Amino acid sequence: MNFLTPGFNDIIDISLIALLLFLGMQFFKRNGNLQLFGFLLILLLSYFLTTLFELKMMTYVLNQIKNYWFLVFIILFQPEIRGVLAKFNQRYNLMKLFQQKQGDIYPKILNAVKALSLRSKGSLIVIERNNNLDKFMESGEILDSAISVKLLLTIFDSRSLLHDGAVVIRNRRIHACKVVLPLSENLDYTREHGTRHLAAIGISEHTDAVVVITSEETGRISLAKRGVLHSNLSLDELTQMLKDETK
């Protein structure tokens, strides 16, 4: 009946299986980084001991894990992977890597600017580029709507509750409106321009955003970028400047 008596290798084999099961349950209960590190460390040690002592049961279990190691890795590291992707997306705006250039949104913006200019309606349209504008949009209202001329005209209608502040364009959509922007303190501009233009210059000083402005007093079109205001632009000049920014 010796075959029923467990040998030294069998005891190690069964003990490792029990330890892996225990650590696995603990991990799914706590799901902490320290527990995850310990679980992986035991897994590597198990591979070493299995090879050293030729443990049959552990060999079978580890072979099954090995066949699906990639899926196991994704499941175990899901929070960490999601965190890394979120940080990468925030820094480099991952969506822009897979989307076409924003050139196709400009006809709608330009048509709205033309109408606002002709009607002498004040407007402030911020086009987000590489720098994330989330901290500025906390002051506004999130819309996340498709760009349309009618919607832009409605937002900047003086009778609208949303007309004060800026509209922010993100990823070809109107992401937010009624956004309060930092005002420029550049003395070259503060003497001649009002709050709307100073806000446009201010956000372009802090970020790489491009800002289109129409004056409520004169209907004139301006564009702010890199802290510089380009005033009294024709629609053709504005079109060319926007195209230059997306090359």
Image (cartoon, helix red, strand yellow):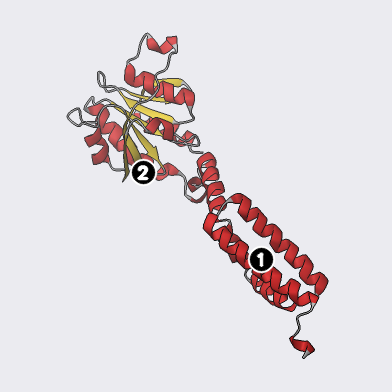
One can see residue 237 in this view:
no
In the foreground, 139 or 92: 139
Question: Percent from the top left, x then y, of residue 86?
Answer: 51, 46
User: How many numbered marks, from 0 up?
Assistant: 2
Label placed on residue 173:
2
Question: Percent from the top left, x then y, of residue 169?
Answer: 38, 38
* Tags 1 and 2 touching, CB below 8 Å: no
Question: For the point 50% across and 41% down, which residue is it?
Answer: 90
Picture quadrant where residue 164 is located: top left
Question: Percent from the top left, x then y, of residue 121?
Answer: 24, 26
Picture quadrant where residue 200 is located: top left
Depicted 136 relative to depicted 182: above or below:
below
Amino acid type at image mark 2: Arg
Question: Percent from the top left, x then y, of residue 125?
Answer: 35, 31
CA distance separating discs 1 and 2: 53 Å
Question: For the point 46% across and 20% down, which residue is it?
Answer: 228
Query: Badge 1 is on which residue?
Result: 19
